Image (tube, helix red, strand yellow):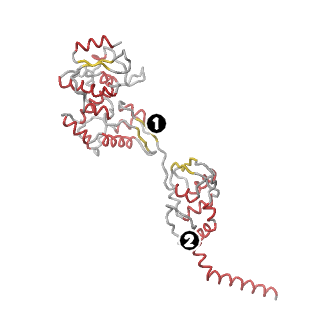
Amino acid sequence: MRKTIRALIFLVAILAVLALFVGGGYLVWKQMSSGPRVDAGTLPTPDTGGVEKQLIGVYLQLRQADLETPADPMGKPVAFTVEPGETAADIAAKLQQAGLIKDADLFRMLVRYYDMANRLEAGEYELSPAMTMVEIAERLQHGRLRETTITIPEGWRLEQIAEYLEERGIASRSEFIALASQDWPEFAFLRDRPAGASLEGYLFPDTYRIGPSYGAREVISLMLSTFDRRVTPDLRARAQEQGMSLYEVLTVAAIVEREAVIPDERPIIAAVYLNRLEAGMYLGADPTVQYAMGFNPNTGRWWNPLTAEDYQSVDSPYNTYTHLGLPPGPICNPGLDAIRAVLYPASVDYLYFVRNDVKGDGSHVFSRTFEEHLENQAKYRR
């Protein structure tokens, strides 16, 4: 009999609790199941439908204080990396291990509630244990993928760029050279490039930040896009005013790039070569012969000193001591200053120059006549 009474009392208590829940308690449930009352910043709006989401919402509401409390309010920022393919559970465990959060399971519930499992981006971050879980979850939606910085100096030839990219693990040498020999119809400025010519001269020297997915094609496209932006329409119009194609400008600019050491001398050296062309003289440019000779396995260099014999013995259309006019194309990839020097040469009537070995600073001495040039050679060459 006593057991029956106890059972009835228990049943009445259960019914009372249910009545309370169905009445005013239901409002509390709805409020709690709506999730944590925290500033969610740019977290996505959750779909709170379904019993599971409502239960997670209740759980987060009960743990609201933990969501709003940093792991270490005095903590300093640290680097944190999310690798491609890592799951929300992986990231939560790493965050806890790094001392950025205190409860990996709570973080996973937060991510699950806001449907963020596929929104956490791979990348490199600077996070702090002084950040709340919500702030960390928000930050992890905006990853910056690991980038590589490469610098292509002015005056490098195509093969040097290809070797550099292979050394950096970005692209194979052979693939880069092959792609640089193909047509790139999306770039209008390449239309005056002779059939069969490579991109030598158009691979704009600069410092580039490239993503982890970049290969030879992406790097070439980036360099051509930079050329398109830096060599402005006004500069291209200036080439037409000079009666030159853009390809011819680059051909002369490449020689100027390899000859000039002192920046202020670029427009003067450009004027010398343009004056020689106008006079029907041989250009007589050492860098064109060096380009024709190519890589020297004995020195391990692409650009090597010349002997007096080389000027006549190197059999190549790039030898401007034995072939009149411009060489077939650019011998390197010139920078903007060398290009501008050809488009805006110095107003001088010099036809010759010689390196000033007395100063030893890479400067040159210029002359108008061959007799003056011979005197300067005797005076300034060592």
Task: Point out the image quarter for the N terminus.
Answer: bottom right
Task: Point out the image quarter for the C terminus.
Answer: top left
| Residue marked by disc 2 | 34
* Number of numbered discs visible in the structure rendering: 2
Residue appearing at x 25%, y 15% in the figure: 373
Q: Is residue 346 above or below residue 12?
A: above
Q: Is residue 75 above or below residue 316?
A: below
Q: Looking at the picture, how far across and down is residue 114, in whole percent?
A: 53, 64
Under mark 2, the amino acid is: Ser
Which one is in front in this view, the residue at disc 2 or the one at disc 1? 2
Query: Pointer 1: residues within 10 angstroms few (<14), some, or many (20+)?
Result: few
Residue appearing at x 36%, y 14% in the figure: 358
| Residue marked by disc 1 | 168
Q: Looking at the picture, how far across and down is residue 286, in whole percent?
A: 30, 21
Q: Looking at the picture, how far across and down is residue 308, in whole percent?
A: 31, 14
Q: Secondary structure at mark 2?
A: loop
Looking at the rendered structure, which numbered label has been put on residue 125?
none
- How far apart marks 2 and 1 lie (CA) works out to 51 Å
